[in-house]
Image (cartoon, rainbow, N blue to C red):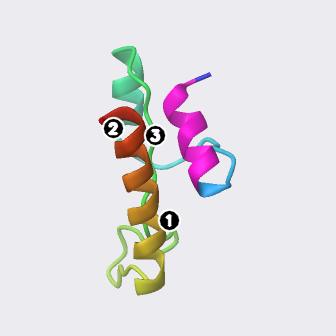
Amino acid sequence: DSPLVRAVERLTGHAAGAAAFGTEGPFFRQLGMDALIFGPGGIEQAHQPDEFIALDSIHPTIKVLQGLIREFCL
């Protein structure tokens, strides 16, 4: 029911789901805050010795961040 999650789902065209890896998300949730972990790249490459982000994944992430700023900050 989070407005933040609904906005990201709308902006990305993807449904949110749970992720089974370590983030600060649960601590934010304990404080009553919405927690959303997303960004460019894939979890398959994250925190690996050869971690990388494909350049073609950066622009779509910028577009989502711009949309979130317009919706929640301006």
Q: Is the magenta stretch mostly helix, strand or loop?
A: helix
Q: Quadrant of residue 2?
A: top right
Q: Against 48, is 72 above or below?
A: above
Residue that label 1 marks: 43
Q: In which quarter of the image is residue 29?
A: top left
For label 3, the SS is: loop
Q: Which of marks 3 and 1 is in front?
A: 3
Q: Where is residue 28 in the image (x, y as percent from the top left)?
A: 35, 26
Q: Against 56, is 20 above or below?
A: above
Name the mark on residue 54: none
Q: Against 66, is 68 above or below?
A: above
For label 2, the SS is: loop
Residue at screen point 44% across, 26% down? 34
Say whether residue 19 is visible: no
Residue at screen point 44% across, 62% down? 63
Of label 3 and label 2, which has the lower sequence position? 2
Q: Where is residue 60 in the image (x, y as percent from the top left)?
A: 48, 69
Residue type of the residue flagged with mark 2: Glu
Residue that label 2 marks: 24
Is the Cβ of the residue at disc 3 closer than 8 Å to that at disc 1? no
Most foreground residue, 1 or 73: 73
> Callout 2: few (<14), some (14-19), or many (20+) C-alpha neighbours within 10 Å?
few
Tell me the quadrant of the picture where the C terminus can be found. Answer: top left
Question: Magenta region: which residues?
Answer: 2-11
Residue that label 3 marks: 36
Left or right: 40 in relation to 24: right
